[in-house]
Structures are given as C-alpha cells and as structure tokens.
Image (cartoon, helix red, strand yellow):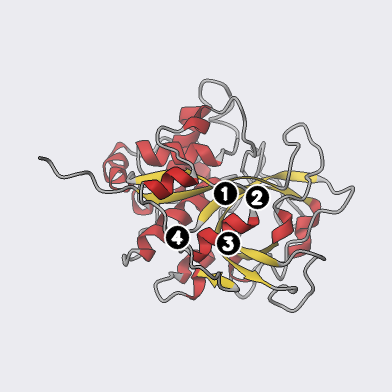
Amino acid sequence: MGNQLFPAHPQGKHGPLYGGLIGPNPKDPAQNARSKVDLRTAMLMGLLRNPPAALPSGVDFGKQAWWDASMYADDQSQLGACVSFASDHMRCFLSLQNGNKRQPHSQLWIYYAMRQRFEASTDPTWQTDDTGAYGSWAEAIMESLGFAREQDWPYDITKFSTAPPPASYGPALWYKNVVPITVPVDAPTWKNLLAAGHAFIVGYAVCQSFYQAQGNGNVPIPPAGDTFQGGHENFVMGYQDGTTYPNGAALPAGAGGYFIFLNQWGSGAADWFSPQNRLYVPYTFLTAPTPKTPDWQGPCVSDATCIALAPPAPAAV
C-alpha cells in the first residue's frame, strides 16, 4: 500500500502509511481491557467533565497556549505504526493539558510491546512483517506496562522487531496511570467530549479517495466504487461547524462541519500531504460506508477511545 511518493515497505502487510487494523475484531483479546469503561461509568467515576450547556461552534486544541506544535512534525515513515503515534499524541495531550511539558513517548517501544503480546502466538511473521496493530492493543499496554520515553528507545523503523532495552520498562511505569474509555462513533458525542476538553483516538478506513486531501487536508466522503486501502489511527483534536473546509472549499452536502485529526505523515513547508499534519474530516465521514473488503465491512470510522488520567489512589486509613 502507498503511492508514487511513498512506495510500500517491502515487509509491510498492513502499511506502511497506515498500520491500523480496523475492527472491532471479536477475536481481539484486548477489546476487553482490564479497566475500559463506557461514557456513563466514566462520568460517575469523575474521569470526564460535562460539556458547556451551549456548545461552541468550534474547538481547536492546537490554539491553546499549552499546545506543543512539535507534534505537527511527527512522521511514522515507512512503518505501520499509526496506532503508536496516535497513542503518543493522546498521552502527550493529557500531560500538556495538565500544565506539564511534552514528554515524547517511544512509538517504537509500544509498537513492539503491542505486537509481542497480541501477535506472537497467532502470527508467526510478526518479527519479520510490519503487521500493524489495533488501537485497543495500545490501551492494554498503556494500562499495564505504561509508555516508555522516546529517549529510552528512539524511533528507528529498521528496529521495529528488535526488543527494547530492559532499562526502558522502569520509567515507562510512570505513564500507566490511564483509564481507556469507549467512545461511540457519533458526531454529537464527539463534539460534546471535545467541548468539555477531552480528546480521543480513532480508527478508520483509508480509501483511494483519501488522497484527494493531499496538499490541503480536506478529507472527502468515499464515493461509490471507491477502493479500500487500509486502516489508520489518528488523534482527534477539535471540530468546526460550517459548510466549508478551512481553505474555503465546500464541504460535502449535509456534512454540517468537520473534525480535526492529527496525522503523522510529516509536515513542514514541503510537506507532501497536509499542512501541519492536520486532516479535516466531515462529520458525515463517520458513518459513510466503506467499500466491502475481506478485512472490514462497515462505516468509515470503526472505533474511538478517550484515554483519561486515572484518579489518585485513596489515602490509607
């Protein structure tokens, strides 16, 4: 998979540009993560805030004073590590929002940990193939092993099947204080969460029409006869009501606005895809049908998860 600018990784089975295995897959053992909760339970636990009574017409975490623009330059390169990057963005978002500096996490470390846990027993090629991952796998790793720091296992796609150094696992435990929360694939729910100050990660289908977003980030609705390319995972950082994309081009009829996804395909003045890695995804993309494939038959967006900081342990009595 790929295009003329990014030829397919020779070992790639589900990548390299994507890497998200879309589901939910009933055989995925991580779909029942230890402490994954629904929205109602998360509210009762005090993990989520209520949205304002009147939602704003738009939310863009990238415009907050605490946002770290270094995330705009992230590039997964020729490895199907999209789930790793989206999870890093989510964990960094939580730190930034709570007044801390960005602590980049090792996308390569969590990529190895996910595949070792969930593919080693079922896919004999996991150490030679770039097999991709499910978003739910990242949640399971974060709440059990934490998330290693980038400095302890730097991103090098030639080492995607190399075991990280043992010394990286201790510092990772500082970042296991999270609770994954299941988010319905529903535009009003997403807007309420974002307006309340919560971001999340999503898995979705990439079709051939997706490449129309090259140069401006304007993601289209897949037309009839489109072809499925692969699964992808991104961090959702905002929304905007309206009838046009940011550059003034008309949104698809009836879209009503767009969500802002943070991609990880490189960014900058000579960026090959979208400025600042931002993608503008119509509200109606969520439920648009994906072309039927052996891998996935359903709407374009298959799942969404909000990751909240776990509440502190009660004091001893």
Task: Kindly state the secondary structure of the residue where label 3 is placed.
Answer: helix
Q: Earlier in the sequence, mark 2 or mark 4?
A: 2
Residue drawn at the location 59% of the way across and 26% of the way down: 125
When asked about the image quadrant of residue 302, the answer is top right
In the image, what residue type sits under mark 2? Leu
Circle 1 sits in a helix, a strand or a loop, which is it? helix
Of tags 3 and 1, the one toward the viewer is 3
In the rendering, at what x and y percent does residue 6 appear?
Answer: 70, 54
Residue tagged 3: 191
Residue farthest along the right direction in this orientation: 225
- Give the number of the mark in front: 3 or 2: 3
**Other-residue count near label 4 (Cα within 10 Å), few / some / many at <14 / 14–19 / ≥20:** few
The answer to the question of whether label 2 and label 1 lie on touching residues, with beta carbons closer than 8 A, is: yes
Q: Closest to the observer: 13 or 212?
A: 212
Q: Please give the residue where the numbered disc 2 appears in the rendered image.
A: 17
Task: Assign a secondary structure to mark 4.
Answer: loop
Q: Earlier in the sequence, mark 4 or mark 3?
A: 4
Locate residue 18 relative to residue 248 in the image: left or right: left
Q: Is residue 69 above or below residue 296?
A: below
Give how far apart the Cα atoms at labels 3 and 1 are.
23 Å
Question: Sequence-wise, which precedes: disc 2 or disc 1?
Answer: 2
Inter-mark Cα distance, 2 to 4: 36 Å
Q: Is residue 183 above or below residue 191?
A: above
